[in-house]
Amino acid sequence: MDNRHVYKSRDFALRWHKHQLEKEDILRTKIMNLLLFRHAGKLENKIVLEAGCGNGFFLKYLLKLNPKQLFAFDISPHFIDICRKQFPLVNYKTADIMSKIPYDDEFFDVVFSYNVLSELPEINTAVMEMQRVTKKQGILHVIIVHPLYNLFVNGKQVEKETVFKKLGRYTKQEPVFVDTLPGYDKFLIYRRPIADYVNEFIKSNLTIEKMIEVPVSSKVVQINKKYKQREGIPVFAYFKLRR
Ligand SMILES: C[S@@+](CC[C@H](N)C(=O)[O-])C[C@H]1O[C@@H](n2cnc3c(N)ncnc32)[C@H](O)[C@@H]1O
């Protein structure tokens, strides 16, 4: 069981988009995006892909880096419609990253995958496919929701567990229910240890050039006190991979 049926629903896509427009995602805008841009460098002569673009939150930022050509796909045709209306110059497709994606081998200079692998029940096909469509010596920027964040913050169904009990589950892959959107409280994502990601990258012959575990920063806490309890907990993991 996975979320693909939820992601394909029009109601979900429209409500997710509305929800994103209403709140500022400060964990991303004030931490992750800034770090990502430091490592992404210039995209001017690059053919770029965002795999799993959602409602286009990150496309907006990618376009500011002036890529030579920007491509994007998502499993949800409704997200793609939303993106197309906002950013008509991007080249879109609807596709499932857990099967063959509709691009030629070695087509892209740079591939971004932002909070997608941590939503999938298995990541082998997704990693292999992103590797396949990247040029030799090309770069993949992969961001995931950190498994510790999912264990301690999102894993609300086991709230009463002690810290040791929780940590004892760290090395297991487990489904996690998150309350991403009101009305979708049984929304399922997958937590797996960092080692599982690393091993998939190795299996696909990708070289890890950089890995950063990105904590909730004091800057975010200053902006919104609700994050105080989470300060220091890694919220994302970032991998810079070379094919
Ligand atoms: C957390 S959202 C991130 C969206 C976007 N990358 C962003 O940063 O805002 C995860 C996205 O992955 C997409 N997704 C989930 N499963 C997928 C699959 N099997 N193939 C392609 N996209 C998928 C969802 O539709 C959703 O848009």
Image (tube, rainbow, N blue to C red):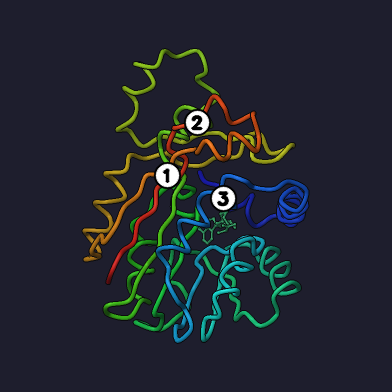
| Identity, as a three-letter code, of the amino acid under mark 3 | Arg
Label 1: element kind: strand
State the residue position of label 2: 231
SS type, badge 3 = helix
Q: Which residue: 46% across, 83% down?
A: 47
CA neighbours of label 1 inside 10 A, class few (<14), some (14 to 19), many (20+): many
Looking at mark 1, is its residue's CB closer than 8 Å to ligand 1? no
Q: Is residue 145 above or below residue 209?
A: above
Residue 132 is situated, as x and y percent measured from the top left of the image, at 33, 74
Instruction: Choose mark 3 or mark 2, whichever is in front.
Output: 2
Instruction: Mark 3 and ligand 1: say if the CB distance to the nearest ligand atom is below 8 Å.
Output: yes
User: Residue 223, position in %: x, y?
Assistant: 65, 38
Residue under numbered circle 3:
28
Looking at the rendering, the quadrant in which ligand 1 lies is bottom right
Q: Earlier in the sequence, mark 1 or mark 3?
A: 3
Tell whether 108 sits left or right of 96.
Answer: left
Q: Quadrant of residue 58?
A: bottom right
* Label 3 – label 2 distance at C-alpha: 14 Å
Amino acid type assigned to the residue bearing label 1 in the image: Val
Q: Reply above or below: 116 against 72.
A: above
Which residue is under mark 1?
Answer: 214
Q: Position of residue 28 (x, y in %)?
A: 56, 50
Q: On the image, which quarter does residue 123 sit in? A: bottom left
**Marks 1 and 2 close (CB-CB < 8 Å):** no
Q: Residues within 10 Å of mark 2 (few under 14, many from 20)?
A: some
Residue 144 lies, with reference to residue 93, above or below; the image says above
Q: Which of the two labelled residues, at mark 1 and mark 2, occupies the earlier sequence position? A: 1
Name the mark on residue 204.
none
What is the CA distance from the residue labelled 1 to the residue labelled 2? Answer: 11 Å
Disc 3 packing (10 Å; few <14; some 14–19; many ≥20): some
